[in-house]
Amino acid sequence: MLKKYKNNQLTKVILTILIIWTLGALMISAIEPGSFKKISNSLWWAIVTMTTVGYGDMAPTTIPGRILAVFIMLTGIVLVAIVTATISSSFITKKIMEGKGLEKINLKNHIIVCGWNLNIINLLKGLINSLNNKQHEIVLINDHHQNDIDNIMTYFQNNSIKYVRGDYAEDSILNKANAHQASYAVILNDTTNNNDEKVILTTLTLKKLSNKIKVIAQINDKNKKPFLKRANADAILSGDDYNSFMAISHISEPSSAQAIKNIIDTSSENSIMSQQIPNEYIGKTFKELHSFFLNENGTICLGLFNKQENMGISDILSSDNSALDQFIEKKLKQAGHSLEEHNKVNIILNPDKNYTIQKGQGVILLK
């Protein structure tokens, strides 16, 4: 409503300027002798007088002409000031609305981060560092305290991060973030507030909005993993699994635990990355591929990956037909997703040195 009002006001002011400009030129042409008799000269004089105090190349000599010039000057100053103020106000209002998360986002191929937890700054740092020059902007969706949001936006002010305020499980809020054109969605779960059911529902909603979006969902209760798998989450993160593994590793293999910690540290020079295998190495051995990457850029081949097509969803789910199962099936059908098959990424770590590289496989590297 505010935007519509300002647009109408701006239109009225511009029309008023055009009317005064035209009438002023016609009147000065009728009043003043000499150069003013030519309408093009009168139009030039009128617009210059409205926007400035005139260049002095043409000046009225009669009393009525000078009175008209004063009127045009004063009117022009007021009208130009109104135009400038209206445009500036529109930009400022838009900026304030964006800062409060009330503006519609019109991005494509962006990354959505739903929810909030204490690790969000590290997550954003890691995303920004890993993206490098890739064209993926980040959109935060949550209803957290505005002060914390402002701190985040200030901290990452040199990076392209947008914000949408609201409940990320609602369709209208996801649409405001243009979720149907996003590439990835990360759904965070606060450890102090178990929102596993909300995470599952949001995963379903995102998959309904777009079957191309990759959803990475975080849950607190690992027993809910089957439901997230049924909702077609592309990756499921559970703090229990990581914490248990690290606790055991620090006891049994402390050096290995420290190495893993360094690899997942966003500020570390070492990280794990995936890459497509050059065509000339299809059909060659893993040993040859390992030597190529080591000599080419000093990276170490940890393993291979490939997508397994047409995997039945029943292969990864529990056999019980709970109410939540039925709800998920219903939502998936409404979204147009098949319950019979989907893609799964298979990982082969440290294959035999004589393992033959196959078409469609990628390589996992440690740099």
Image (cartoon, rainbow, N blue to C red):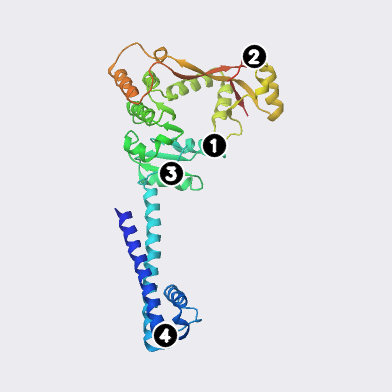
Q: CA distance from mark 3 to mark 1?
A: 16 Å
Q: Percent position (x, y) of residue 151?
A: 43, 46
Q: How many marks?
A: 4
Image coords of residue 214 (percent x, y) = 45, 29
Q: Which mark is residue 162?
A: 3
* Label 4 SS: loop
- Residue drawn at 44 percent across, 41 percent down: 107
- Residue type marked 1: Leu
Mark closest to the chain's N terminus, 3 or 2: 3
Q: Residues within 10 Å of mark 1 (few under 14, many from 20)?
A: few
Mark 3 surroundings: few (<14), some (14-19) or many (≥20) residues within 10 A: some
Viewer can see residue 155: yes
- Location of residue 23 (image quadrant): bottom left
Q: Are marks 3 and 2 in contact (CB under 8 Å)?
A: no
**How far apart are labels 1 and 2 at the CA level?**
31 Å
Badge 4 crowding class, 10 Å Cα cut-off, few under 14, some 14 to 19, many 20 or more, is: some
Find disc 2 in the rendering and name its residue. Answer: 356
Asked if residue 93 lies left or right of residue 125, the reply is left
**Which of the two discs, 3 and 4, sits closer to the camera?**
4
> Which mark sits nearer the N-terminus, 1 or 4?
4
In the displayed orientation, state which residue is furthest to the top: 319
Image quarter of residue 193: top left
Left or right? Give the position of 143 relative to 353.
left
State the CA–CA distance, disc 3 to disc 4.
58 Å
Amino acid under label 3? Lys
Q: CA distance from mark 3 to mark 2?
A: 45 Å
Q: Residue furthest front?
A: 38
Up-down relation of residue 318 to residue 247 (above or below): above
Q: Which residue is mark 1?
A: 131
- Mark 4 highlights which residue? 32
Q: Residue at x 43, y 88 (%)?
A: 61
63 displayed left or right of 246: left
